[in-house]
Amino acid sequence: MEKKQIIHAVAIGSALVLNLSATAYAAQSGDACTNGTATTVASDASYFVKNNFTPKCSNNTSVKFAQTATDFYVKGASSKGMHTYGGSTEGGGVGVCENSSIANPQSSISPNTSTVSGFPLGC
């Protein structure tokens, strides 16, 4: 094979791998609880949740989730509380997501799928 053809084959192969990776790891997100009312989290073979489930939600709580093909992230708050809480399947447990109280915690419960220094994944 000529050098030029090998470079083309490598470039095409790399583009294919990058495209497959971007598709496989695109995050999907949604609501699991809204003010204490549960929403069914639907299964999808290309994401982490493989079986539908409906969470049990306490009154006044709201919970959002995000998932990729390999991980599940969650963040929630109570309308009567002063903090948000987050966690993920990547380990580290569930914990508080801010150092000081916030006025309306339910307004900032979209889970973060990246590391936030000092806080669990999901915060």
Image (cartoon, rainbow, N blue to C red):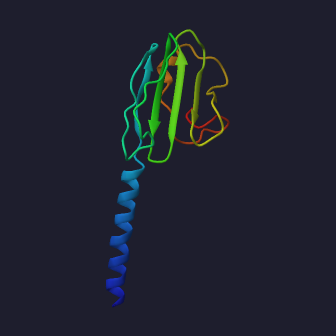
Image position of 11 (left or right of 85): left
Could you tell whether 117 is left or right of 45 in the image? right
Q: In the displayed structure, would residue 18 be above or below residue 31?
A: below
- Quarter-wise, where is residue 100 in the image? top right
Q: Which quarter of the figure has residue 8?
A: bottom left
Considering every residue shown, the one lying at the far front of the view is 51
Q: Is residue 112 visible?
A: no
Relative side of 100 to 111, left or right:
right
Looking at this view, is 55 or 88 the one in front?
55
Q: Position of residue 97 (x, y in %)?
A: 61, 27
Q: Picture coordinates of residue 89 (x, y %)? A: 56, 40
Image point (52%, 11%), residue name: 79
What quarter of the picture does the N terminus occupy? bottom left
Residue 37 place in picture, x, y as percent: 42, 15
What x and y, as percent, mark residue 56? 49, 19
Q: Nearer the viewer, residue 51 or 94?
A: 51
The C terminus: image quadrant: top right
